[in-house]
Image (cartoon, helix red, strand yellow):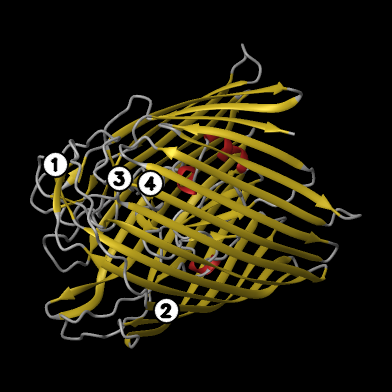
């Protein structure tokens, strides 16, 4: 209620009840977010307010407010205490995202030892034969219980609901913490591994044809001999010390490493309306290394009737990408509706994995929240200085291009609370993404452009009453981009997204809970310099998105809760000229859970069915015109016991 932004948080309890395996499953509950990933695919990617998040090689999810630590392509939920969604640009709040997302920010808070000790074991099943489970242990130690330890481990393996596909994945997290009167410190170790045989990929479509009808979501054109393996290791150390009752110093540092080995078709392409798909395999290896650190001060003080919460921070981030690959010498055809069994290809592994890029993001920020009249009037003022440095390297290790630019991004947020249960808020905030370098085909080849500044204006209302929160917001985000203008490459392009968002969350009546939201979006390409695209709807940006979820504690059976959700997404364009599009779709999910006691242990049994009516649909379009098939009907079962 005091934040001058649109913020939604999902707790560990909500994650467990939904049986969400990844952060992507959690975020799909919000109508401002759409999951732009293929079921059975290799990564989680999203759109937030119509802009892409997480399509690159560098994670767009922050861990405890820091980029560069969370697992790169997919984040498991077993060790997650809370998933936070901040809508709109977040460069001022948590720094520039490595891949420059502007539609919103995602932060995960890891589980740490609670006041009460915990031993919890979960066994679960997912169609077709994915079996596994999770162990969650929490203890506090010491005479004053100042030391905490939380251990989470999960593993799942077996065939998925897609043809020919199997997946085994494990995740482990160790969280240590120390608390006394002045010092608070945490240390997190996280590891994830995933191996998928026959991983699915987004499908591209050649221009000039209508988009074929969506296939059965179980059909998988990827061959059993194609595979993807991803391993992640992460570490984060944080400390905060109270210099006085009103002044605290903090320092954080950490990083992560990702190793990837893949053999599959990178961009399978639909070539006709009969659903024939051209595929050409590549043997890839990636190594991604990330490091991050920040330090600063937080202070609270008064100047007359005005209360201040002041923050000063300096931050640094670095990543390095190493990549090697070998392409197949031939391509083949298969079919969406009747996938063919293709002979295995021998494509040798790359002989080396050379460094191809290195990026550094350094910055400093100051922000002050001023409040009057017992926080009924609050204003947040802030500014961040950001330096962006990057280098690209050739196969021999020589620098082929260099980028070194800087930008300053201000922020203004206002909150007015005419009544304690009503907040009126507004903000102006900017996002940052790395500017382009003019391509070799341009007359100004090699020219480096300053970081692109995206600007958001937003205003909204939040009402909290009787266990319910209702929200309404209106926003506009403009994002610059590069484009060719004759023979000259310029930063004159722009995408402008305007929208209205509605949310209704909480307990509407005794035993009845709602999780509902809707987004009306007008996403336009502006200043394109082309009559074919000027004013057209941006790719992958539906006009209307809506989620309606509800839970009911059944009065006739104590301990039983029934749940359901309806998800609607409007038509989406595949290309910028708006000549190809996928139709609207609606999906229904149902679930139930039962809390009881078995062998004197608190036990929760859960059942969820996604896509109950087994609808066939194209689910989403990414920023590059890749199309995702909708998930087939999927059964999820789990049993959780606390000791």
Q: Nearer the viewer, residue 136 or 402?
A: 136
Q: Is residue 4 visible?
A: no
Residue drawn at x 39%, y 48% as measured from the top left: 196
Residue assigned mark 2: 358
Residue 482 place in picture, x, y as percent: 25, 73
Residue 108 place in picture, x, y as percent: 57, 54
Query: In the shown orientation, is residue 531 left or right of residue 384?
Result: left
Secondary structure at badge 1 equals loop
Q: CA distance from mark 3 to mark 4?
A: 29 Å
- The tag on residue 224 is 3
Mark 2 or 4, which is nearer the eye?
A: 2
Mark 3 or 2, which is nearer the eye?
A: 3
| Nearest to N terminus: mark 4 or mark 1 | 4
Q: CA distance from mark 3 to mark 2?
A: 35 Å
Residue assigned mark 4: 34
| Nearest to N terminus: mark 1 or mark 2 | 1
Q: Nearer the viewer, residue 12 or 454?
A: 12
Residue drawn at x 50%, y 32% as measured from the top left: 125
- Asked if the residue under mark 2 is in contact with the one under mark 1, i.e. CB atoms within 8 Å, the reply is no
Residue 496 place in picture, x, y as percent: 30, 60
Secondary structure at badge 4 equals strand
Residue 591 place in picture, x, y as percent: 49, 26
Within 10 Å of the Cα at label 1, are there few (<14), some (14-19), or many (20+) other Cα atoms? Answer: many
């Amino acid at each position: 209620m005091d934040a001058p932004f649109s913020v939604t948080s999902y707790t560990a309890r909500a994650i467990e009840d939904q049986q969400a395996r990844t952060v992507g499953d959690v975020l799909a509950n919000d109508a401002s977010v759409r999951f732009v990933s293929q079921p059975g695919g290799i990564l989680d990617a999203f759109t937030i307010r119509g802009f892409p998040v997480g399509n690159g090689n560098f994670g767009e999810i922050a861990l405890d407010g820091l980029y560069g630590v969370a697992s790169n392509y997919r984040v498991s939920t077993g060790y997650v205490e809370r998933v936070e969604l901040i809508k709109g640009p977040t460069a001022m709040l948590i720094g520039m995202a490595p891949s420059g997302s502007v539609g919103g920010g995602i932060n995960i808070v890891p589980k740490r030892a609670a006041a009460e000790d915990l031993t919890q074991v979960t066994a679960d099943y997912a169609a077709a034969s994915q079996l596994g489970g999770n162990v969650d242990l929490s203890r506090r130690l010491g005479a004053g219980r100042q030391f905490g330890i939380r251990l989470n481990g999960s593993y799942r393996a077996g065939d998925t609901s897609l043809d020919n596909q199997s997946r085994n994945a494990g995740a482990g997290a160790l969280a240590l913490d120390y608390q006394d009167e002045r010092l608070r410190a945490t240390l997190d170790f996280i590891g994830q591994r995933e191996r998928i045989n026959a991983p699915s990929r987004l499908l591209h479509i050649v221009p000039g044809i209508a988009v074929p009808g969506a296939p059965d979501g179980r059909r998988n054109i990827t061959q059993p001999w194609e595979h993807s393996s991803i391993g992640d290791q992460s570490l984060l150390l944080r400390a905060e010390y109270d210099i006085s009752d009103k002044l605290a110093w903090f320092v954080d540092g950490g990083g992560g490493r990702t190793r990837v080995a893949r053999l599959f078709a990178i961009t399978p392409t639909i070539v006709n309306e009969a659903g024939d798909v051209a595929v050409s395999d590549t043997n890839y290896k990636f190594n991604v290394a990330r490091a991050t650190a920040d330090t600063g001060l937080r202070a609270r003080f008064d100047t007359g009737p005005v209360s201040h919460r002041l923050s000063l921070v300096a931050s640094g981030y670095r990543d390095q990408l190493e990549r090697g690959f070998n392409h197949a010498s031939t391509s083949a055809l298969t079919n969406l509706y009747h996938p063919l069994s293709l002979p295995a290809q021998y494509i040798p592994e790359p002989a080396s994995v050379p460094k191809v890029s290195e990026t550094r993001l350094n910055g400093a920020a100051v922000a002050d929240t001023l409040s009057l009249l017992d926080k009924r009037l609050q204003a947040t003022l802030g500014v961040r200085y950001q330096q962006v440095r990057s280098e690209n390297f050739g196969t021999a290790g020589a620098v082929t291009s260099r980028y070194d630019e800087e930008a300053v991004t201000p922020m203004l947020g206002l909150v007015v609370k005419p009544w304690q249960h009503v907040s009126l808020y507004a903000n102006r905030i900017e996002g940052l993404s790395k500017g382009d370098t003019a391509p070799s085909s341009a007359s100004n080849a090699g020219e480096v452009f300053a970081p692109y500044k995206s600007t958001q204006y937003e205003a909204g209302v939040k009402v909290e009453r009787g266990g319910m929160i209702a929200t309404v917001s209106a926003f506009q985000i403009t994002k610059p981009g590069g484009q060719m203008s004759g023979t000259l490459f310029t930063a004159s392009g722009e995408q402008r997204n305007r929208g209205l968002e509605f949310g209704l969350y909480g307990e509407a009546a005794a035993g009845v809970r709602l999780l509902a939201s809707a987004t009306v979006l007008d996403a336009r390409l502006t200043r394109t310099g082309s009559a074919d695209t000027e004013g057209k709807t941006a790719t992958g940006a539906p006009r209307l998105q809506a989620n309606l979820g509800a839970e009911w504690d059944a009065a006739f059976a104590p301990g039983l809760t029934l749940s359901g959700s309806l998800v609607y997404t409007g038509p989406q364009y595949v290309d910028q000229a708006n000549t190809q599009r996928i139709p609207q779709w609606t999906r229904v999910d149902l679930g139930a859970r039962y809390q009881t006691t078995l062998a004197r242990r608190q036990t929760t049994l859960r059942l969820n069915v996604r896509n109950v009516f087994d609808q066939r649909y194209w689910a989403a379009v990414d920023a590059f015109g890749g199309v995702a098939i909708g998930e087939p009907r999927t059964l999820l079962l789990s049993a959780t016991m606390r000791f």
